[in-house]
């Protein structure tokens, strides 16, 4: 019996560790979270298991006033919209910054590419919390960014950049741009560059070659990069918490507050499930767009 016959015969046994990991690491936590989202909250935090209620979901758009009457409100919807807006801006900014960097790396000799890829990944070796506190030093009043702008005579008064939405956007761009560069580079590396030479020989200028040859061939990496940036940027909470000073509330911060200060775990689970639904909707929309374009690209 050859090796392929042995693997085929024992494939269920070989796949059992992976199946156990999927069940224990993904399916079981999601099931617990689903049950928690439709359970009643205990008076002093926690969950009343076995007492089911839809109040966590109705709280998204209704709240009780002093007369215990349900009042329609859009506060949480605005938090979702703000999170979507910032996640989309982060994705677009990472694409604008990441594509030229990935193209530059792909055009270098092979030994320089490895060195540049290591430089791109070095910041991720350090803890994100430490890197964000370094950004506080740079963005605070009198910090490195303000001193640089004063030295360039671009701004004379106090910058006031820290603990604003701009500081949060800068932190998101910094944290997620490597996740855009690496998949785009992986697609560019597979390009047959003789097509680019042929386009130049046929009279195409650099912009036409980029737009009609390189960008379509790099589209799978662009889609994967956009998904890898958009989904975590939608639910991130530590960056808005540290650089936004908790004044720029995003959906990740709201979920964190429900599990900590508010002690309302069912509502936190319901918010998490709604966020998961929006993320899955984004991935399905990505696959729909790629299908309309005539090809199915892997979105994650």
Image: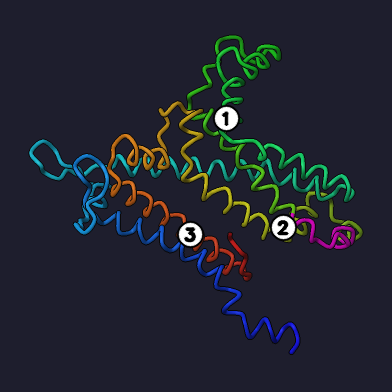
- Indicate the position of residue 225 as horizontal and vertical percent values: 63, 52
Disc 2 and disc 3: Cα gap in Å?
33 Å
Q: Residue furthest bottom?
A: 1
Q: Main secondary structure of the magenta part?
A: helix
Query: For the residues carrying marks 2 and 3, which lies nearer the camera in this image?
Result: 3
Q: Quadrant of residue 126?
A: top right
How packed mark 2 is, by other alpha carbons closer than 10 Å (few <14, some 14-19, many 20 or more), is many
Quadrant location of the N terminus?
Answer: bottom right
Residue 277 forms part of the magenta stretch:
no
The reply to whether discs 2 and 3 touch (Cβ–Cβ < 8 Å) is no
How packed mark 1 is, by other alpha carbons closer than 10 Å (few <14, some 14-19, many 20 or more), is some
- Indicate the position of residue 89 as horizontal and vertical percent values: 54, 41
Q: Residue furthest top?
A: 156
Residue 190 forms part of the magenta stretch:
yes
Front-lying residue, 25 or 109: 25
The kind of secondary structure element at disc 2 is: loop
First of labels 1, 3 by sequence position: 3
The reply to whether discs 1 and 3 touch (Cβ–Cβ < 8 Å) is no
Magenta residues, as a range? 186-198
Q: Which residue is mark 1?
A: 132
Residue depicted at 79% across the width and 57% down the height: 189
Disc 2 and disc 1: Cα gap in Å?
31 Å
Front-lying residue, 217 or 265: 265
First of labels 2, 3 by sequence position: 3
């Amino acid at each position: 019996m050859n090796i392929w016959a042995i693997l085929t015969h024992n494939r269920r046994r070989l796949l059992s560790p992976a199946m156990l990991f999927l069940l224990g690491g993904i399916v079981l936590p999601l099931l617990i979270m689903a049950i928690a989202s439709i359970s009643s909250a205990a008076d002093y935090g926690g969950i009343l298991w076995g007492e089911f209620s839809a109040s966590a979901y109705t709280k998204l758009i209704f709240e009780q006033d002093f007369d215990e009457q349900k009042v329609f409100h859009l506060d949480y919807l605005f938090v979702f919209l703000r999170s979507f807006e910032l996640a989309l801006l982060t994705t677009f900014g990472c694409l604008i910054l990441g594509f030229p960097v990935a193209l530059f790396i792909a055009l270098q000799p092979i030994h320089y590419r490895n060195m540049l890829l290591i430089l791109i990944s070095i910041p991720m070796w350090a803890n994100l919390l430490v890197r964000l506190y370094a950004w506080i030093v740079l963005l605070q009043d009198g910090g490195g960014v303000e001193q640089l702008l004063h030295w360039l005579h671009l701004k004379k008064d106090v910058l006031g950049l820290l603990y604003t939405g701009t500081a949060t956007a800068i932190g998101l761009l910094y944290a997620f741009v490597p996740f855009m560069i690496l998949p785009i580079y992986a697609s560019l590396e597979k390009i047959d560059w003789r097509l680019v030479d042929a386009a130049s020989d046929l009279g195409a200028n650099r912009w036409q070659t980029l737009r009609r040859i390189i960008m379509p061939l790099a589209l799978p990496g662009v889609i994967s990069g956009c998904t890898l940036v958009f989904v975590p940027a939608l639910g991130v909470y530590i960056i808005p918490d540290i650089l936004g000073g908790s004044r720029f509330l995003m959906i990740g911060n709201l979920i964190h507050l429900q599990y900590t200060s508010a002690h309302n775990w069912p509502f936190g689970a319901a918010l998490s499930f709604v966020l998961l639904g929006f993320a899955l909707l984004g991935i399905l929309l990505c696959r729909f767009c790629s299908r309309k374009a005539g090809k199915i690209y892997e979105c994650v």
